Image: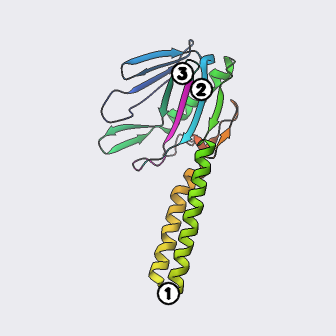
């Protein structure tokens, strides 16, 4: 099974293959094969960017200190970043299956680190208090347009940031229970 993506418009594609010997990779003129048992950490996360809201990432570490990243999107033109949702999902699911078959003891984690996640929640709580204060001030001053703007901004912000925070909750998972929130949808017919 193979998977490839372009991390930027300039440069070659990052290529990966699941072989009998392990995870084979080729990135920027470097290449290698990591035995499935030598993979020490797999970290899945949801990482949207402005040009692609459905972007997922897998960071894979091996026991010798190497790290590779696999993204669910690829650059096609200067203005187009295309999703590869079902290809990415199939590759990541198969990687986990092969690691489990090989008897891997890798640490499987998802989302943000606990400290980063806690800092994000504190920042969001501070922002919510500030926005509530501004809303109360606008209502007391009978500034209806300002209040409406704040409510609209809060709704948009909650929609955009809420999904990121909810999906990236720190978690541990097992080989047979991959977190659906950190993988593209399984439906191949649906646009990712």
Residue 123 relative to residue 76: left or right: right
The residue that disc 2 covers is: 94
Q: What residue lies at 50% left-to-right and 39% top-to-bottom? A: 85
Task: Tell me how far mark 3 sits from mark 2, CA to CA.
Answer: 23 Å
Q: Residues within 10 Å of mark 2 (few under 14, many from 20)?
A: some
Splitting the image into 4 quarters, where does residue 128 fall? bottom right
Splitting the image into 4 quarters, where does residue 4 fall? top left
Please report whichever mark, 3 or 1, sits nearer to the chain's N-terminal start.
Answer: 3
Please report whichever mark, 2 or 1, sits nearer to the chain's N-terminal start.
Answer: 2
The residue that disc 3 covers is: 65
Q: Residues within 10 Å of mark 1 (few under 14, many from 20)?
A: few
Q: Nearer the viewer, residue 13 or 157?
A: 157
Q: Where does the image place residue 151, in percent across and percent down from the top left? A: 52, 73
What SS does tag 3 mark?
loop
Residue 101 relative to residue 19: left or right: right
Position of residue 181 relative to residue 138, above or below, is above
Position of residue 191 relative to residue 10, above or below, is below
Task: Tell me how far mark 3 sits from mark 1, CA to CA.
Answer: 59 Å
Per the rendered image, the range of residues in magenta is 50-61
């Amino acid at each position: 099974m193979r998977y490839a993506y372009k991390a930027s418009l300039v440069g070659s594609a990052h290529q990966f293959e699941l072989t009998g010997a392990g995870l084979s990779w080729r990135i920027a003129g470097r290449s290698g094969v990591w035995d499935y048992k030598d993979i020490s950490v797999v970290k899945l996360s949801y990482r949207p960017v402005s040009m692609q809201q459905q972007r997922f990432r897998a960071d894979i570490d091996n026991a010798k200190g190497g790290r590779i990243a696999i993204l669910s999107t690829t650059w096609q033109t200067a203005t187009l970043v295309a999703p590869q949702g079902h290809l990415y999902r199939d590759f990541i699911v198969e990687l986990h299956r092969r690691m489990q078959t090989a008897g891997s003891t890798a640490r499987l984690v998802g989302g943000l680190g606990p400290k980063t996640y806690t800092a994000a929640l504190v920042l969001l709580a501070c922002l919510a208090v500030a926005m509530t204060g501004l809303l109360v001030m606008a209502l007391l001053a009978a500034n209806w347009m300002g209040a409406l703007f704040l409510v609209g901004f809060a709704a948009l912000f909650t929609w955009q940031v809420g999904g990121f925070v909810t999906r990236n909750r720190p978690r541990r998972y097992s080989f047979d229970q991959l977190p659906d929130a950190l993988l593209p949808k399984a439906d191949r017919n649906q646009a990712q």
